[in-house]
Image (cartoon, helix red, strand yellow):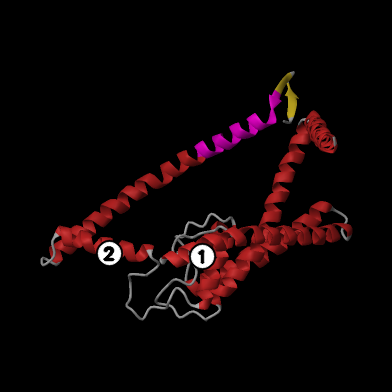
Amino acid sequence: MARFQVAQIKVSWTALLALAHFTYLLLGATVFQILERDAESNNRNHFQLEKLNFLANYTCLDGPALEKFVEVILDAWEKGVNPSGNSTNPTNWDFSSSFFFVGTVVTTIGYGNLSPSTVSGQVFCVFYALCGIPLNLAFLKQLGKCLTIHLGRLERGMVSLVLAVSLFLITGSLVFLVIPTLLFTYVEEWSYGEGFYYAFITLSTIGFGDYVVGTDPHKQYISVYRSLAGVWIIFALGWLALILNMGARSMEYAISLTYPGFKKQEEEEDNISSSKQEDGSGQRAIQSKI
């Protein structure tokens, strides 16, 4: 466990990181509670008012019948069926949509707006994810290595590392964030803020499911639209993973500059841990020979 000295007191880096992590969670929970609780209350009151107005306009219905109809709508939505429109709505399980779905499975995004409803589909999804998630991680790791090599070539061809990283960040942002967001804004008729929100929530694998491309029953999408979105997700994840890794390394570098003894102590403890593991392996090998 890495430790560094602050004001002659040894502080556990793991404890500090845990404290910062949970403090960040508490801060986020407090902010979201302040921002969203009143809006939720207003939306709930508005929905109840709309139900009362509906019952007042359609006196042939009573409260229990309306609640039953609402349950039917919610059940249809949970099974991936859009309750608006009619039976001529596009299917959610054509090849393009299915390709988009398996992309969200192996990347663990899981929007939640679509899932298998049959037992056979659910069983296949489990085993498909068990094999697909490691395969996707291996692919993203290799893609990250390729991008790192490319970044190293940029660094050798430029005077400053900062300039190389800036160029890599700007180019990736344009290709994987700005341009796709513009396309989503145009096709889905979202605001640019909504499109950017969808792109980031998707690439960070948060995947709330409040915004999903290709789900509006009133639009005519090209057949490969969602397939292209799935391909975009795969490659953009590799770029974003490298960016986040660079950010984590930058934080470690900043800490090592602020507390010079931290890096040295961390390396020493890692070396001690590695030595103990090697000694243990050697002893087991000797015992097996005996």
Question: Which residue is tagged 2?
Answer: 72
Q: What amino acid type should be assigned to the residue bearing mark 1?
A: Phe
Residue 106: quarter of image: bottom right
Q: In which quarter of the image is the N terminus?
A: top right
In space, the residues marked 2 and 1 are separated at their CA atoms by: 27 Å
* Element at label 1: helix
Question: Which residue is tagged 1?
Answer: 124
Name the residue rendered at 42%, 72% in the picture.
Answer: 216
Q: How far from the left and from the top, in percent, is residue 277?
A: 79, 35
Q: Does the magenta stretch include residue 36?
A: no
**As drawn, 1 above or below 233:** above
Residue 62 placement, left or right of 277: left
Frontmost residue, 235 versus 260: 235
Residue 102 placement, left or right of 238: left
First to last magenta residue range? 11-27
Frontmost residue, 118 versus 56: 118
**As drawn, 96 above or below 5:** below
Frontmost residue, 24 versus 35: 24
Mark 2 vs 1, N-terminal side: 2
For the stretch drawn in magenta, the main secondary structure is helix
Q: How far from the left and from the top, in percent, is residue 82?
A: 37, 70
In this view, which residue lies farthest toward the front?
A: 290
Q: Residues within 10 Å of mark 2 (few under 14, many from 20)?
A: few
